[in-house]
Image (cartoon, rainbow, N blue to C red):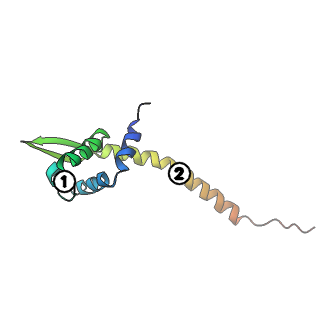
Amino acid sequence: MQKTALDQVFTALADPTRRAILDRLRQGEASAGDLARPFAMSQPAVSRHLATLSGAGLVTQRRDGTRRIFRLAPHRLTEIDAWLDGFRAAMEENYARLDSLLTEPEADDAP
């Protein structure tokens, strides 16, 4: 079974290291070496995380000489937000129905 773009995004976001990399990229572009610095792992391991993020469409990269520079690719985050909006709307509708039920006056059962 082929993964959808949304599946790839959630798979990428499931790892705390990849989420930390995305958090760092909120501050702006960074090289692969800069992104690897805070982690106790090899450069190849961080590169695999970056490849996963790139494959999911969460980051883009460009070359600057021999360095690879990464930055956030917000279109995927927009897609996630749109997907979550459906859940938000359903929950708001459910809460509105519950509020309506809770505020209805109780019927007098006495004859």
The percent coordinates of residue 33 (x first, y second) are 14, 51
- Which label belongs to residue 36? 1
Q: Which structural element holds mark 1?
A: helix
- The residue sitting at 51% across, 53% down in the picture is 88
Measured in 3D between alpha carbons, the distance from the residue under mark 2 to the one under mark 1, in whole angstroms, is 39 Å
Instruction: Say which amino acid is labelled 1.
Output: Ala
Work out whether residue 110 can be spotted. yes
Say if 15 sits above or below 111 in the image.
above
Quadrant where the image shows the C terminus: bottom right
Q: Residues within 10 Å of mark 1 (few under 14, many from 20)?
A: many
Instruction: Say which amino acid is labelled 2.
Output: Ala
The percent coordinates of residue 30 (x first, y second) are 17, 52
Q: Which structural element holds mark 2?
A: helix
Q: Residue furthest left?
A: 65
Left or right: 109 as drawn, with respect to 66? right
Left or right: 29 as drawn, with respect to 76? left
Q: Residue furthest top?
A: 1
Q: Earlier in the sequence, mark 2 or mark 1?
A: 1
Quadrant where the image shows the N terminus: top left
- The residue sitting at 19% across, 51% down in the picture is 42
Work out whether residue 71 can be spotted. no
The residue that label 2 is drawn on is: 89
- The residue sitting at 70% across, 61% down in the picture is 101
Q: Tell me which corner region of the image, top left, top right, bottom left or bottom right, holds residue 20.
A: bottom left
- The residue sitting at 41% across, 48% down in the picture is 81
The percent coordinates of residue 100 (x first, y second) are 67, 60
Give the tally of numbered discs.
2
Q: Residues within 10 Å of mark 2 (few under 14, many from 20)?
A: few
